[in-house]
Amino acid sequence: MKITWFGHSVFEIISEEGLKILIDPFISENPACDKVVEEFKPDIVCITHGHRDHFGDALDIVNKTNATAVTIHELSEIFSENGLRAEGMNIGGSLEIENIKIRMVEAKHSCTVDIMGERRPGGHPAGFIIELENNKKIYHAGDTGLFGDMKTVIGEIYKPDIALLPIGGHYTMDPKDAAIAVKWISPRVVIPMHYNTFPVIKQDPEEFRDLVKRESPETKVVVLNPGESYEE
C-alpha cells in the first residue's frame, strides 16, 4: 500500500492490488503540486466537498480516465449531468468498488460549489474512511474543525489505521486541535495535510509532530513533502 501526498489535501492511494484512489484532486491550480492532470490515472476519485481547492480537476480527470467519482449526493449530480460515472453518498453511508470499501463520515465545514460559472449548493462536507483489500483503514478528514464524533464514532467504532488530518488553521483545525483529534482517533500513523499551500494556512508541521509525540506517543507522525510517499 502506497500513499502519496501532492500538497494541500490531494492524496493518491495505491492499494495492494494496484487500485488507484485519488482524493480531492486540486491539481492544475495547486501551487504545491508539480504534476499535470494528465499524469493521474485513478480508478476512483473521492471528493470531500465542493470548494474549488478540493473539487479541483475532478470533472476533467473522471472524464479522461472513466474513473468513478465518489462524493456527497448533490455533487454526484454534477457528474451525472455531464454524462460521467458517479456514486452519490451521504453521511454514514458506505459502498464497495472493486473490493475497496468506502464510508462517508461527518466533517464540520461549509460546502458550496462554483463550477462552469454557476454557484450552487454542494450538499454536506464529508470525510472518508477507505478500507483496502488488506483491511487497512485510511481516514481522510477533508476540511474540518475538531468535533466529538472523531472520538466516539471514528475512533471508537471505525478505528482507522492511518489518519490524514488538516492542520492549517483558519479554515480547519490547527496543529493543537489536530493533535487532540489524533488522541481521540488513536491511529497508528497520522499524516498532516491542508497547510502551507497559501499564506493564510501557513503552519510548521514539526509543531504538530511535537504535540502528537507528547500527547499520543504511540502514533507515528509522517510529515511528507509534496510528491513524497508513505508505504507499508
Image: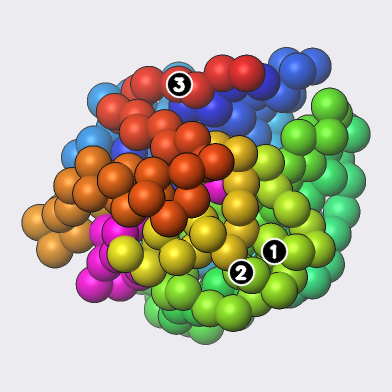
Q: Please name the amino acid that badge 2 sits on.
A: Met
Q: Which residue is mark 2?
A: 150
Q: Which residue is mark 3?
A: 229
Q: Tell me if I can see residue 46 in this picture.
A: no
- Compared with 47, 120 (above or below) is below
* Dot 3 or dot 1, earlier in sequence: 1
* Dot 3 or dot 2, earlier in sequence: 2
> Viewer-proximal residue, 117 or 76?
76
Spot occupied by residue 185 in the image (x, y as percentages of width and height)? 61, 58
Question: Which quarter shows the N terminus?
Answer: top right
Q: Please name the amino acid that badge 1 sits on.
A: Ile
Mark 3 or mark 1, whichever is nearer to me: 1
Q: What is the distance, in whole Å, between disc 3 and disc 1 at their CAs?
A: 24 Å
Quadrant in the rendering for residue 209: top left
Question: Which quarter shows the C terminus?
Answer: top right
Q: Secondary structure at mark 2?
A: helix
Magenta run includes residue 93? no
Q: Secondary structure at mark 1?
A: helix
Mark 3 or mark 2, whichever is nearer to me: 2
Quadrant in the rendering for residue 101: top right
Marks 2/1 in contact by CB < 8 Å: the verdict is: yes
Q: Which residues are magenta?
A: 162-175
Mark 1 surroundings: few (<14), some (14-19) or many (≥20) residues within 10 A: some
Q: Which residue is mark 1?
A: 154
Left or right, 201 with respect to 82, comes to left
Spot occupied by residue 10 in the image (x, y as percentages of width and height)? 44, 42
Spot occupied by residue 152 in the image (x, y as percentages of width and height)? 71, 74
Q: Please name the amino acid that badge 3 sits on.
A: Ser
Quadrant in the rendering for residue 110: bottom left
Left or right, 226 with respect to 192, comes to left
Q: Which residue shows up at 18% across the image and 53% down it?
A: 203
